[in-house]
Image: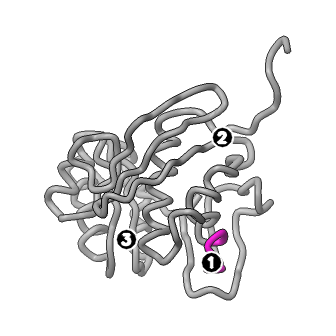
Amino acid sequence: MLALVLREAGLRPSFIIGGDVNEIGTGAAWDEGRLLVAEADESDGSFLALPRRYGVVTNLEPDHLEHHGGFDALRSAFRRFVDETDGPVLVGVDDEEGALLAEATGAVTVGTAAIADWRITEVEESWDGVRFVLNGPDRNPVDMEIPIPGIHNARNAATAAVAGILAGADREAAAGALARFGGVARRFEHRGRAAG
């Protein structure tokens, strides 16, 4: 999602992500811009080894504990991720752990929760996607629509939009790119409707 937002804004990012983006046809590309979007996760701790100007934590839950040695160690790894990022880090605050991480680090927050710096409101869900309003700290709301279902996808889209805006994309480019986001290959690909 973020790579599409940055491309739509003309920032020409390079990217390495976990699946093929349907609109681009690949999960990795080198381009002329100054930004590289990398999808990293906490499964083996390697997300801490990547130098970064921006960071995104969509959620924090007890996963991959066999590598980290327990939930407290995983929390500490995420705290390091936020603390060691050179610029802003976005943290989803619709779950308790994300809210605690954001509070402890002063991260920029995104979500439906009232405490979010970038708040998702007026959510309308259907099988065809999600519509919502993204309200930032500047009180300049933007209408968003994504053609894939689920509030979790709306949260991801809002976070991608905010990350793009912080990196130099305008709101219209972010909304436009996300309105055309068809998902990642083999994840939420529209194949048709049963019996009709």
Residue 149: % across, % down: 59, 33
Q: Is residue 70 visible?
A: no
Q: Is residue 95 visible?
A: yes
Please give the residue where the numbered disc 3 appears in the rendered image: 48
Real-space Cα separation, disc 1 to disc 3, in angstroms: 21 Å
Real-space Cα separation, disc 2 to disc 3, in angstroms: 32 Å
Judge left or right: residue 46 versus residue 23: left
| Of residues 14 and 154, the one drawn nearer to the viewer in this rendering | 154
Q: Nearer the viewer, mark 1 or mark 3?
A: 1
Judge left or right: residue 95 versus residue 58: left
Earlier in the chain: of badge 1 and badge 2, it is 1
Earlier in the chain: of badge 2 and badge 3, it is 3
Q: Nearer the viewer, mark 1 or mark 2?
A: 2
Q: Residues within 10 Å of mark 3 (few under 14, many from 20)?
A: some
Real-space Cα separation, disc 1 to disc 2, in angstroms: 23 Å
Please give the residue where the numbered disc 1 appears in the rendered image: 13
Residue 58 disc label: none
Please give the residue where the numbered disc 2 appears in the rendered image: 147
The kind of secondary structure element at disc 1 is: loop
Callout 3, which amino acid? Leu
What predominant SS class does the magenta segment belong to?
A: loop
